[in-house]
Image (tube, rainbow, N blue to C red):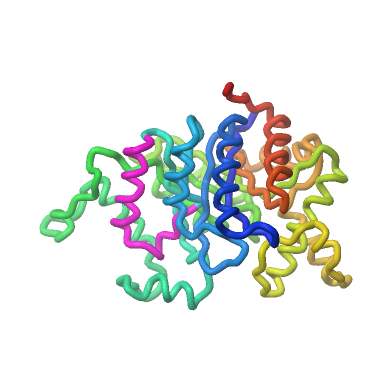
Amino acid sequence: MLPLAILDLSVVTSGTPPAAALRNSIDLARHADQLGYERYWLAEHHNLPSVASPAPEIMIGQIAAVTERIRVGSGGVMLPNHAPLMVAERFKMLEALFPGRIDLGIGRAPGTDQATMHALRRRLDVREGDDFLERLQELTLWETRGFPAGHPYNNVMAMPNDAPLPPIWLLGSSDYSSELAAQVGMGFAFAHHFASYDAVEALTHYRARFQPTRWRTKPHGILAVAAVVGETDAEAERLALSMDVSRLLRDRGRYVPLPSVEEAQAIQLTDADRASIARNRSRLFVGSPTTVLQMLEPLIKASQADELMVITAIYDHEARKRSYSLLAEGFELQRIAA
């Protein structure tokens, strides 16, 4: 079956403060390691009451230290927020400490609002317009040492210099990101869970136009989806109500911790609200393991995805772990012996 991975936002709930959400991420990663998941990625978001982790590289180190085989990475580092040298050094350090288990996923978005973005970047050398390509090139040059003759960075070494950069993945939700990942010959992860662009088009375009490079000789496309799995369809529908209402509130401009099922049920929904939830369900797969697999199969087949990455936001931590267990059983993952 298709390899499975997890994208974790360290979700803060109305009953789980941010510090506890971070500890839950570590617990979930241990669980995923035993279930046989391929990789576990942490996101970078800032000034969001519903997301506890603004620094994926810190969480990567913590999780890699308490797991045994699962790959751990960023999903992703928002490169425009950081000096490329700092990204190179941090991830070379992680690779040195946990060789062969680290992924460097990078994105173009700020992962926050305009005011917070300014606070993050105001001491950096910010260019006018989109300077992502320039930053990506500089990041790779710290590894290849390909700066032009006479360039001042030729005398600067990204340490530890005996550890390589881990595999680089470009994250995206558009045709631009799939085209760029293909051109530079890197892995590509498509965010179906919030993209308006077609996942099938993005992933097949990436595969068709992929150019082998030193970074990767063959394309590898990850399809990232949102899913809630329960023992039954009815149970999954009940658990998914938290995600439904959370998305509705975000669309209204309210970024609050994930509500409980009971809190979500208590919200008075208008007909327009119900219509909005129904539209958003095109990006959320809900049901028993059999139902979710049946829903996902056409998308996986059409997109030719090499791997499925799942984000699951459930109020109750144990129910969230159970959702990932049920999904692993459905995909027939090989559980790792304790």
| Residue 82 horizontal side relative to residue 218, left or right | left
| Residue 298 horizontal side relative to residue 99, left or right | right
Residue 42 position in % (x across, y down): 52, 50
Rendering quarter of residue 198: bottom right
Asked if 211 appears above or below 259 in the picture, the reply is above
| Residue 13 horizontal side relative to residue 80, left or right | right
Count up the numbered dots. 0
Q: Is residue 79 magenta?
A: yes
Q: What stretch is highlighted in magenta?
A: 76-98
Asked whether 188 or 91 is in front, the reply is 91
Task: State the residue lying farthest toward the top.
Answer: 337
Q: Which residue lies at the image location 30% right of the left edge and 50% below the top edge?
A: 89
Asked if 75 appears above or below 32 in the picture, the reply is below
Residue 244 seen in the current view: yes
Q: Quadrant of the N terminus?
A: top right
Q: Which residue lies at the image location 42% right of the left edge and 47% below the top edge?
A: 104
Residue 197 position in % (x across, y down): 63, 58
Rendering quarter of residue 160: top left
Task: Give the overall secondary structure of the magenta segment.
Answer: helix
Q: Which residue lies at the image location 58% right of the left edge and 34% below the top edge?
A: 37
Asked whether 171 or 211 is in front, the reply is 171
Q: Which residue lies at the image location 72% right of the left edge and 63% below the top edge?
A: 246
Asked whether 136 or 157 is in front, the reply is 157
Q: In which quarter of the image is the C terminus?
A: top right
Task: State the residue lying farthest toward the left.
Answer: 150
